[in-house]
Amino acid sequence: MQLRVVFIFISLLCFSFVQTVSAQDQTPVLTGSNLCALEPANFSLGGLDPLPDTLFWSIDGVEGAMTSDLGTSIRSESVRDVAVSVRWIVEGEADTLSQTFRIEECICEVAMPNVFTPGRGGLDSTFGLGHNQHCRDTDINLDRFETSQLMIYDRWGELVYDSCEDANCRVTDRWDGMRNEQEIPSDVYIYIYRYQLRDIPGSSITHELETLTGEVILLR
């Protein structure tokens, strides 16, 4: 008789636990990621079960078109607060969630690779600005740079490449291991990279002209 009582008590506890973690009791959550000026800032809605049939995203009070996407993104030109709201409909019932997010200036840490292989294809076949977070993704985020110049010298101090040679300095310019349209041999070369990041409106950070120097190995 005592064993039956204990068994029933445990069964009730298990039933109560299952009810506590059921999906129906989840709370909708509005989250943000990569909240950086001059980059895509992402917002998403989670914690809903069942999923909404229809959603309407609003940024700073401006509602967008009807969508089924659980996320949206914006690109802010300045450091500021962004009011994000999402209205959704599930089984004919509407609900809304709103939150304010802060868009900040994310630090761009400029760095250069130490080796490249001309003529072998891919990004490593040229030398220039590396894959730096908040400086470039698959393509260089040009809006982060006010100015940029890359110069390459050989071991005897002779200039072999200058990205500003034609007075049209471009952040996208990269050295292809050539000099006067001729291949130069595998060796260690010296680079000087001068750049200035753009000041972003609303940010307390002021950017000055910076110089980055180092060695790069050219391998053929």
Image: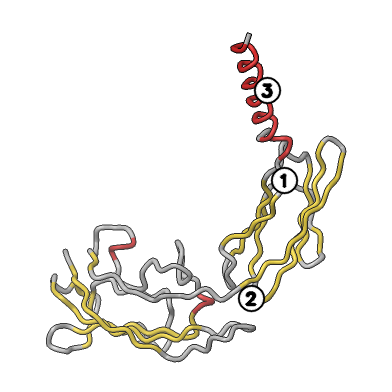
Q: Is residue 207 visible?
A: yes
* Eye-nearest disc, 2 or 3: 3
Q: Residues within 10 Å of mark 3 (few under 14, many from 20)?
A: few
Name the residue carrying label 1: 27
Q: Quadrant of the N terminus?
A: top right
Q: Which residue is mark 2?
A: 77
Residue 77's x, y, as percent? 64, 76
Q: Taking 219 as reference, is 208 above or below it?
A: below
Give the number of the mark in front: 2 or 1: 1
Which amino acid type is marked by label 1? Thr
Residue 155 in the figure: left or right of residue 17: left
Q: Residue at x 61, y 12 (%)?
A: 2
Residue 205 marker? none
**Which quarter of the image is occupied by the C terminus?**
bottom left
| Percent of width and height locating residue 33 | 58, 60
Q: Dividing the picture into quarters, in which one does residue 91 lie?
A: top right
User: What's the residue at 24%, 71% (across, down)?
Assistant: 114
In primary-sequence order, the first of circles 2 and 3 is 3
149 shown above or below 84: below
Query: How far across and how far down the image is residue 55, in percent?
Result: 77, 47
Separation of residues labelled 2 and 3 (CA atoms): 57 Å
Residue 12's disc number: 3
Say if 11 sits above or below 179 in the image: above
Q: Earlier in the sequence, mark 2 or mark 1?
A: 1
Amino acid type, callout 3: Leu
Give the image's coloring scheme. Answer: secondary structure
